[in-house]
Structures are given as C-alpha cells and as structure tokens.
Image (tube, coloured by chain):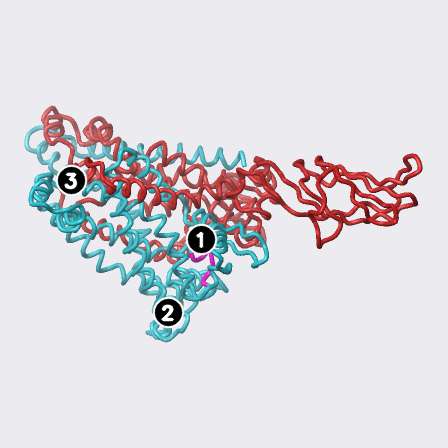
C-alpha cells in the first residue's frame, strides 16, 4: 500500500528484522515458562531453559556406601554402584575437588595403597582394594544428560496441588459470568438502539460514563451489602427454607449452627458482580453494533405487524451474532483472568480458590519452585490462549467496534 | 466438585430460563393489560401506552444491575470516605487529610504517576511501530497474532512469566532467569531486579506494556489502513521518504485513534493491581494506589473509610477521561 514495501532495498530487510525482534521479545518470556514447565526440578535449577534442547553437562559429587556394602571378588574387596540415577552419561570423573575431571570414563584412578576407582560412561563405578575398604569415598564426576522433557509437573500440580479443583472453580465462575450479562445487555442494547423513549440519550451517556468507573470502587459497598443480605435472610437452619439453603450450597450457617442465611461469599454473588461490572461494555458494544443494522429491515418488519419483542428475537439477535461473540470472548477472558473480584467475593479457603488466586498463593509459598509455578501458570493460561487463537477474528472486531470512532 | 458443577449448570439453566421468561412474560403481560385490538380509540391509546412502558421492560434489568453494582457504590464510597474504619463514625475530612499527609500513600501516588507517564506512552508507541511494520510484510498477520497474544494472559499469569525472566541466583551459580543470564553473558553482575529501588518500577511496568502493546497495535493498524491512499500517493509524488510519510502524513491523520488508545491504556494503568500485588505486594518501593487501596480495604482488619477514600481518588483521576468519552459519544450520536 505504501511505496516502501515494493522496493527490494535494505530497508525491507530492516523491516523484517525489526518485526522479528519484536515477535521474539513478545513470545520469548512465555516460551521460556512453557519449556520450563516441561523440565524436571533438577534440570531447571542447574541450567537455563534455553539450554533445554541441547545436552546439559553438570558437575556433581557422590559418595560410595561404607565398607559394609563391599563384596569380595577373588582376592580384592569391591564396592560397586552407579553414580547416575536419571540416565545420561559420564564424560569425566576425578577423585579430588581440585581435579574433578582428571580421568576419562573407563580409566582407572589410583587412590594409593593399592585402591583403585574406575567409572564407566554409563555411570557404573567400581572401587576396589587389596584389603577391607572403609568406603565413603567421594567421586567427582561430570555427567551429560540428553534433552529430556516430562509431563510430570503437570500431573503433579493437577493431582497434589489442587489445580484441578481451581480449574473447575474458574470455570464455574467464568461461564455464568459470561452468559448472564450478555442476556441482560442484549435487550437493553436493542431498546437503546431502536426504541425511542424519553431519557434514552441520557441513559446512553450514563453508560458511557460508567465504562470507566474503576470496579475497585464497588468492592466495599457490595461486600457490605452482601453481608447485610446474609444477615437479613437468616432463618431457622432446620426449617424447610433453611434445609433447602443448606443443600443448594447457597446458605451459610451461623457460628452456633441454629441460623442459616444467604452466603455472602457465593458463586451467585460473584456472577452478579461480574454481570454488573461487565454490563457497560456489553451494552456499549452491542448498541453500537445494533444501531448500524439496516433500518429498512426493522421498519418493514414493523409495518408487517411484528412486535418489538419479535423484531428483537427473530431479526436483531441473529444479525448481531458477531457483536455477541466479541463481547462473550472479552467477558470470558476478563472473568477467567480476574483476581480481584474472585479474591474479594469468594472465600479464601483452599477448595474455593480460582486459578488466578491459586497462582498468587503459589507465588508466595512456592516462590522458587519453578516446576510447580510454571506448570500451574500454563494450566491457567491455556484456556484463554485457546480461546484467543481460535476466536481472534471476533476479538479484533470487538476491539475495533469498542474503540475506533 | 461434581455437586459444584451440577449447581453451576443448573444455575445457568435457571438463570437463562428466568431471563427469557422475564422478557417474554413481561411483554405478554403488557399486551394483556393494554390490548391493541380494543375497539376504536382505546386501541390506539393502548398501543401508545404500551409503547411508553415497553422500552423500560427491555432496559429494566440492566438499569437495575448498573445502579446496584456501579452507581450505588460510587455514592456509598463518597459517604464512607467521610467515616471511620468501620464505616459508622463520622470523621469529616480526616481520611482526605490522611491521604495527603501519609508517606506510603505519597510514594504510591508518585509511582502511579510514573506508571501513567511511561506505560501508555510506551505501549502506544510500540503498538504504532509494530502496526506500521507488520502491515507491510507478508507474514504480518502471524506477527500480529503473536504480539497480540499476551492480551489473553492474566495479569497474575504474566507476573509469573516475567518473574521467571527476572529470576536471580547468587553470582557463583548458574543463572536461570533470562535477564540475568544475558547480563552475566556480557560480563555483568547478576542483580535481583525487582528489589532494586526505583528501577524495579520499570521492571513491573514492562509487564503491562508487554500486555497492552498488542491492543494498541490492533487498533492503530486498523486506523492506519483507513487512511485514504490519495494522501500518501500525493506525498510519494512530492518526493517524501518513508519516515516523512509516516510521521508527517499518516500519524496526524490518526491522532484521534491514538488518543483513544492512550486514554484506554491510562484507565487500565490506574486500575492495575494484580501485577504489583502478585510480584512485590508493594515492597521495595513499588506500591501503587490500587494496591494501597486493597491493603487498606481488606488487610489487617480493614479500614473502610481510608479504602473508600483511595478508591474515590482513583475515580477522580478517571473523571476527565470519562467526560471526554461522553462528549465523543454524544458528538457521534448527533452525527447519525
């Protein structure tokens, strides 16, 4: 489109290279964490993830067992074993920390007093001497391990760290919190786009204003409100309504176990909160889209005697699918990725943490355990990434509808 | 867990049915109360009356939810900001005086200003550059996708990703963090980046820039493509070079879009809390207002008065953008 791209000048190469640089900068951090999530804790701590594809060499020390493990072979006493526990090969060994790579595998090191040590490439060693051995001999060796990847970290965090539970919790929060606002917003957007009524433009202005209200503002007032509702709805825990509340999971028992009220920290509360916070954008996006629908279609349907309700469900709603999809993606990404609303409106108990909350917890308690952090982080971002790459078209469309004037 | 999934599924089903039921039922009810088929004058009058009420049936639930979750909290926060820690005792302007005088708040405020200066500028600039470049190469769409990708990652997830980049090991150990590995490869000394006062703010900002650049790029790229070709062709004929065309011809034509991107990112910056909360929790002089607000609201028993005051200040900082947005929307509606 611009005279720039057509010419085969050095400038074209500069352009390709700069984009390549940008792309590398933007993907490398994520790639690093992904590769890390596929390595064992040992590998992670001895070498950077960028070495994962090449063989890694590391220096290590081991000690032979003490004399009780020895066997007698002919006239010599022998302690045998293997320095490698996880495979790989030994490329050098030594007998002192000053010269840890003095011998090649297969060579025999003379330790004095007729005692010899040899380490083979496969890691097996043999310490032997003419008299009874004391054992406990230190062996310095350099091992080379081939690139190896494992899904063990994922298996571990899913089973032992409660990530599976957190995954389910995130899903429980995100799906209804996406569906409910769409329903409410679609009707409102239709009225604001196609039904003239007094105060309509004022309402639109208010919604545009609410677009930027920081949701932090709502946390204390709404939390207080939820607590008050919990107290106000308290009924006898053993009555019909109380029993229903208990088994539906909506109730929270009072400390003495006699009263039960609506639980202030329930999924219902989070869904409604996300609904409230997502509505301005939803109405704004959908109205902008619906206003752009051809007037003739709607007018002719009116002339044919269709009611507003019919026009909405049969004509406007199906035509608005792209806008609905855009908002659905936004809201899903937002609710799945949210930490603040979930932290405030759900309880902090381990079994009700969502993935972001769990990750935050792990950052505090397992700050250095990168195998756990990396695998957990990847489980949590896999869903949004999947949504992102599958539905990018709608996401871009929604962004453009929301921002470009 | 199974019970939870069933409950969630049931709630969705009940919710959707109830919502449809409400909209459908209320419309039917309206038609029953004001039958349009009534004889003579009453029929037309009924249609008019129903027409007055019906829009409110459509917007009703939305207005209710917006009032409860956004409008009422603003009012309640204003009220709370004049009250003490439990929200009952009236303290006048005490919370505001505390806000102005408190050293930690001032530090957070200054950091916030730094964020406001750096992040929108850097994201918009990088977005503009990548938009201009990717539009002109054959693999531009793939590049765009990859630069846009961090947008899908949660702030906490991004924090984990970058914490690994900044990871620090003592100088005699193998560095497993990318940044320190590069630094030591060039012969420098490894550094615990997120604990270095002042500069650590920038290491945190990098995360948000990394997330927001894709957003800026997507929108600016669309705007660049919307520029009329004639203006560019004319410039080419007049002998302008690539950079001149870009900065003198193209950028001025998309100023309004740049402003939209800039303000949108500014709002995000003001609200951002997760990155600081998860990475440092405000330690090593990295605090920002949104994190201070969380600390005052929910940690150590909570001080609702002070928490609400901080929230209100953040809100006040957004108000100019809010007014500007409303004006734009108004102007646009008049144009229709």
Which residue is identified by label 3? B226
Q: Nearer the viewer, mark 3 or mark 1?
A: 3
- Please state if B41 lies on the left or on the right of B105 as rendered: left
Which residue shows up at 21% across the image and 60% down it? B320
Farthest residue to the top: give it. A304
Q: Quadrant of residue B83?
A: bottom left
Rendering coords of residue B300 (x, y %): 50, 64
The magenta span reads B276-282
Q: Under tag 1, what secondary structure?
A: helix
- Could you classify mark 3 by the number of other residues whose Cα lies within 10 Å: few (under 14), some (14-19), or many (20 or more)? few
Please tell me which residue lies in front, B151 or A229: B151
Give the vertical position of A160 relative to B101 (above or below). Answer: above
Q: Where is residue A301 drawn, in percent x and y? A: 13, 26
Q: Could you say whether the residue bearing mark 2 is in a helix, strand or loop?
A: loop
Residue A396 image point, x, y percent? 27, 38
Numbered disc in front, either 2 or 3: 3
Q: Chain of mark 1?
A: A
Distance from label 3 to label 1 (Cα)?
Answer: 43 Å
In the rendered structure, the answer to whether residue A391 lies left or right of residue A122 reads left
Drawn colour of chain B?
cyan
In terms of depth relative to the viewer, which is nearer, B310 or A382?
A382
Query: Which residue carries the number 2 mark?
Result: B83
Measured in 3D between alpha carbons, the distance from the residue under mark 1 to the one under mark 2, in whole angstroms, is 21 Å
- For the N terminus of chain A, the image quarter is top left
């Amino acid at each position: 489109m611009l005279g720039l791209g057509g010419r085969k000048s050095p400038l074209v190469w500069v352009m390709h290279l700069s984009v390549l640089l940008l792309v590398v900068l933007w993907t490398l951090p994520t790639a690093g964490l992904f590769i890390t999530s596929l390595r064992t804790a040992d590998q992670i701590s001895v070498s950077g993830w960028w070495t994962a594809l090449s063989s890694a060499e590391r220096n290590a020390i081991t000690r032979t067992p003490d004399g009780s493990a020895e066997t007698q072979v002919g006239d010599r006493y022998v302690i045998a074993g293997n320095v490698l526990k996880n495979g790989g090969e030994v490329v050098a060994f030594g007998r002192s920390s000053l010269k840890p790579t003095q011998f090649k595998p297969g060579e025999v090191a003379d330790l004095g007093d007729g005692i010899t040590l040899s380490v083979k490439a496969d890691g097996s060693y043999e310490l032997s001497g003419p008299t009874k051995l004391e054992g406990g001999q230190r062996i310095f060796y350099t091992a080379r391990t081939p690139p190896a990847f494992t899904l063990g970290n994922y298996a571990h965090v899913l089973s032992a760290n409660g990530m599976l539970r957190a995954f389910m919790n995130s899903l429980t929060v995100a799906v209804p919190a996406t569906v409910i606002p769409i329903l409410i917003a679609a009707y409102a957007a239709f009225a604001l786009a196609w039904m003239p009524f007094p105060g309509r433009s004022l309402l639109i202005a208010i919604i545009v204003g609410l677009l930027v209200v920081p949701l932090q503002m709502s946390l204390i007032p709404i939390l207080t409100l939820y607590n008050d509702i919990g107290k106000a709805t308290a009924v006898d825990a053993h009555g019909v309504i109380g029993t229903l509340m208990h088994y539906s999971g909506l109730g929270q028992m009072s400390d003495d176990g006699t009263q039960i009220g609506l639980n202030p920290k329930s999924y219902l509360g989070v869904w409604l909160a996300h609904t409230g916070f997502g509505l301005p954008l939803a109405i704004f996006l959908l109205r902008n889209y619906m206003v752009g629908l051809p007037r003739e279609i709607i007018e002719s349907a009116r002339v044919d005697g269709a009611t507003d309700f019919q026009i909405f469900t049969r004509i406007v709603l199906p035509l608005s699918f792209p806008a609905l999809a855009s908002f659905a993606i936004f809201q899903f990404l937002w609710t799945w990725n949210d930490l603040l609303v979930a932290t405030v409106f759900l309880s902090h108990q381990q079994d009700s943490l969502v993935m972001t909350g769990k990750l935050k917890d792990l950052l505090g308690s397992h700050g250095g355990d990168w195998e756990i952090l990396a695998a957990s982080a990847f489980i949590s971002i896999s869903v949004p990434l999947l949504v992102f790459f599958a539905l990018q078209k709608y996401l871009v469309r929604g962004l453009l509808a929301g921002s470009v004037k | 867990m199974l019970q939870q999934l069933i409950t969630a599924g049931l709630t969705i089903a009940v919710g959707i049915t109830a919502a449809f039921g409400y909209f459908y039922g209320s419309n039917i009810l309206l038609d029953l109360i004001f039958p349009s088929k009534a004889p003579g004058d009453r029929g037309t009058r009924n249609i008019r009356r129903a027409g007055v009420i019906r829009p409110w049936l459509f917007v009703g639930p939305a207005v209710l939810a917006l009032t409860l979750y956004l409008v009422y909290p603003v009012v309640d926060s204003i009220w709370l900001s004049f009250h003490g820690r439990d929200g009952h005792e009236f303290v006048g302007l005490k919370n505001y005086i505390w806000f102005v005088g408190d050293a930690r708040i001032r530090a957070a405020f200054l950091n916030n200003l730094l964020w406001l200066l750096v992040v929108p500028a850097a994201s918009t600039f990088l977005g503009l550059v990548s938009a201009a470049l990717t539009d002109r190469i054959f693999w531009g769409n793939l590049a765009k996708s990859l630069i846009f990708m961090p947008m899908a990652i949660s702030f906490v997830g991004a924090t984990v990703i970058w914490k690994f980049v900044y990871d620090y090991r003592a100088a005699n150990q193998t560095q497993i963090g990318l940044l320190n590995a590069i630094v030591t490869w060039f012969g420098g000394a490894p550094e615990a980046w997120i604990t270095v006062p002042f500069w650590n703010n920038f290491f945190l900002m990098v995360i948000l820039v990394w997330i927001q650049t894709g957003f800026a790029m997507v929108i600016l790229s669309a705007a660049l493509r919307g520029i009329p070709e004639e203006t560019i062709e004319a410039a080419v004929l007049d002998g302008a070079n690539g950079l001149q065309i870009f900065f003198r011809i193209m950028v001025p034509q998309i100023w309004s879009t740049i402003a939209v991107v800039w303000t949108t990112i500014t709002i995000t910056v003001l609200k951002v809390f997760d990155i600081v909360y998860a990475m440092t929790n405000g330690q090593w002089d990295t605090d920002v207002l949104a994190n201070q607000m969380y600390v005052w609201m929910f940690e150590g028993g909570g001080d609702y008065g002070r928490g609400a005051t901080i929230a209100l200040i953040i809100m006040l900082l957004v108000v100019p953008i809010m007014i500007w947005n409303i004006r734009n929307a108004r102007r646009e509606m008049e144009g229709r």
